[in-house]
């Protein structure tokens, strides 16, 4: 296993549950018990109705590309060997817009509205990152 040389998540009191879930390959989000909003990023209060009544749900890991950018320049040494790579905002089936990478795909083939699904990247003993790959349609 090679040394991971990219920035690591820095969990805080709000998103610690999220990163613990990722480590178990569970994609967890807060859901407001009063208005039903499934929110991202995690927060103490619902940004829609200010309720603090919250439960945790496991998202399907399915969604579509809302928008994306292909990086041809590394702004951090750790990303140099990945160039070119795709950073995308994924519109999840449950609603939240989630920033991640598109993998297992030629950067030139990424398109808006393209269906994607989660794939876990186990980067260290403590962290797994949720990334996304195209949904292969079999006919
Ligand atoms: Zn709410």
Image (cartoon, rainbow, N blue to C red):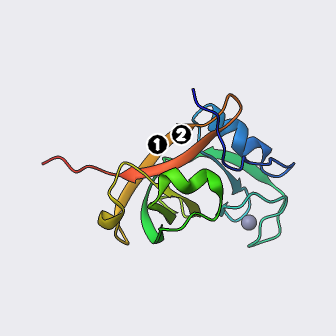
Q: Residue at x 51, y 63 (%)?
A: 87
Left or right: 89 in relation to 54: left
Residue in the image at 72% along x and 36% along y: 20
| Quarter containing the N terminus | top right
For label 1, the SS is: strand
Q: Is mark 1 within 8 Å of ligand 1?
A: no
**Residue at 39 percent of width and 51 percent of height:** 133
Quarter of the rendered structure image containing ligand 1 = bottom right
Q: Position of residue 36 (x, y in %)?
A: 65, 61
Q: Is residue 11 above or below residue 66?
A: above
Q: How many marks?
A: 2
Near-viewer residue (9 or 39): 9
- Residue occupying the far left of the picture: 139
Closest to the camera, between mark 1 and mark 2, is 2
Mark 2 highlights which residue? 121
Residue 66 position (above or below residue 106): below
Ligand 1 within 8 Å of the CB at mark 2: no
Q: Secondary structure at mark 2?
A: strand
The residues bearing labels 1 and 2 have C-alpha atoms spaced at a distance of 7 Å
x 71%, y 32%: residue: 126
- Which mark is on residue 136? none
The residue lying toward the viewer, choosing from 117 and 58, is 117
The residue carrying pointer 2 sits among few (fewer than 14), some (14 to 19) or many (20 or more) residues within 10 Å by Cα, namely some
Q: Position of residue 40 (x, y in %)?
A: 67, 61
Q: From the viewer's perspective, is residue 128 above or below residue 97?
A: above
Q: Position of residue 76 (x, y in %)?
A: 65, 59
Nearer to the camera, 15 or 54: 15
User: Percent from the top left, x then y, of residue 3?
Assistant: 64, 34
Give residue 119's mark. Answer: 1
Q: Residues within 10 Å of mark 1 (few under 14, many from 20)?
A: some
- Disc 1 + disc 2, Cβ < 8 Å: yes
Q: Is residue 3 left or right of residue 68?
A: right
């Amino acid at each position: 296993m090679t040394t991971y040389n990219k920035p690591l998540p820095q969990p805080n009191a709000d998103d610690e549950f999220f990163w613990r879930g990722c480590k178990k390959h569970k994609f967890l989000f807060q859901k407001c018990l009063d208005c039903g909003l499934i929110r991202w990023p995690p927060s103490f209060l619902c940004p829609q109705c200010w309720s603090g009544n919250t439960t945790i749900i496991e998202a399907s890991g399915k969604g579509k590309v809302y928008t994306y950018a292909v990086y041809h320049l590394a702004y951090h040494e750790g990303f140099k060997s990945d160039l070119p790579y795709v950073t995308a905002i994924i519109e999840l089936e449950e609603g939240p817009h989630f920033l991640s990478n598109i993998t297992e795909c030629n950067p030139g083939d990424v398109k808006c509205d393209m269906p994607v699904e989660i794939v876990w990247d186990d980067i260290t003993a403590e962290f797994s990152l949720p990334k996304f790959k195209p949904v292969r349609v079999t006919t």
